[in-house]
Amino acid sequence: MLKFDTNTNFLAPALSIFTPAIGQIFFSRNAILHFASSASFRCHLIAFSGKRKSRLRSLRIFNDIECKPSCYIGILTAINIAISLLTLTAAVLIGLPNPVTLGVLAFMLNYISLIGHAIMAIVLFAVGLIAVASLGYALIAPDIFITNRPSRTNS
């Protein structure tokens, strides 16, 4: 029979996995934005556009590339903070171990569209099943997490 030690802290292994992944995502995003916003790249691409209308459209696209990802990441971060606070609150109320760790994990996993939310629901179910050893109570935390999904409609 498998025995699980619920007293161990899984924050360190979780951070060792997700910290490089999140760092790579932000590095890639910044590298793409830096390349797209460099003056020489802009000038060559705009000069390549033949007509005045095409050049203006290229300029608008470059301006959107610089502005809108920052807005998107900011809004996504605010939504993820709310989701992590909801997860933390639910974990405390249900009595799951390490509620802060579950909240941080929910925050990080929600940056991965679709898959991250599913992984977090599975983690909540597994932790609930181990902590309370009842299927009904184990489904409460993932149920709260899944019913919150419509509030994040960007993925």
Image (cartoon, rainbow, N blue to C red):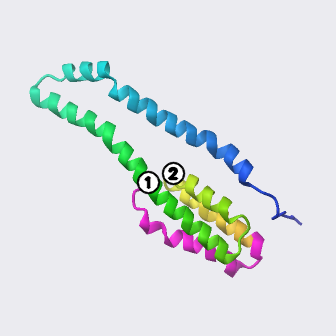
Q: Residue at x 25, y 36 (%)?
A: 61
Residue 20 in picture, x, y percent from top left: 62, 39
Residue 11 in picture, x, y percent from top left: 71, 53
Q: Which mark is residue 76?
A: 1
Which residue position holds label 2?
Answer: 111
The N terminus lies in quadrant: bottom right
82 relative to 5 in the view: left or right: left
Q: Does the magenta run of residues contain 153?
A: yes
Residue 59 in picture, x, y percent from top left: 21, 31
Q: Amino acid at mark 2?
A: Tyr
The C terminus lies in quadrant: bottom left
Q: Residue at x 42, y 67 (%)?
A: 151
Q: Is residue 19 above or below residue 49?
A: below
Q: Does the magenta run of residues contain 134?
A: yes
Q: Dividing the picture into quarters, in which one does residue 53 lie?
A: top left
Dot placed on the residue nearer the N-terminal end, 2 or 1: 1
- Structural crowding at the residue carrying mark 1, measured as other residues with C-alpha within 10 Å and reported as few (<14), some (14–19) or many (≥20): some
- Could one spot residue 77 in this view of the protein? yes
Q: Secondary structure at mark 2?
A: loop
Q: Residue at x 45, y 36 (%)?
A: 29
> Who is closer to the viewer here, 101 or 21?
101
Q: Is residue 148 above or below residue 70?
A: below
The segment highlighted magenta reads 130-155
Q: Secondary structure at mark 1?
A: helix
- Could one spot residue 139 in this view of the protein? no
- Structural crowding at the residue carrying mark 2, measured as other residues with C-alpha within 10 Å and reported as few (<14), some (14–19) or many (≥20): some
Main SS type for the magenta part? helix
Residues at circles 2 and 1 in contact by the CB criterion of under 8 Å: yes
98 relative to 22 in the view: left or right: right
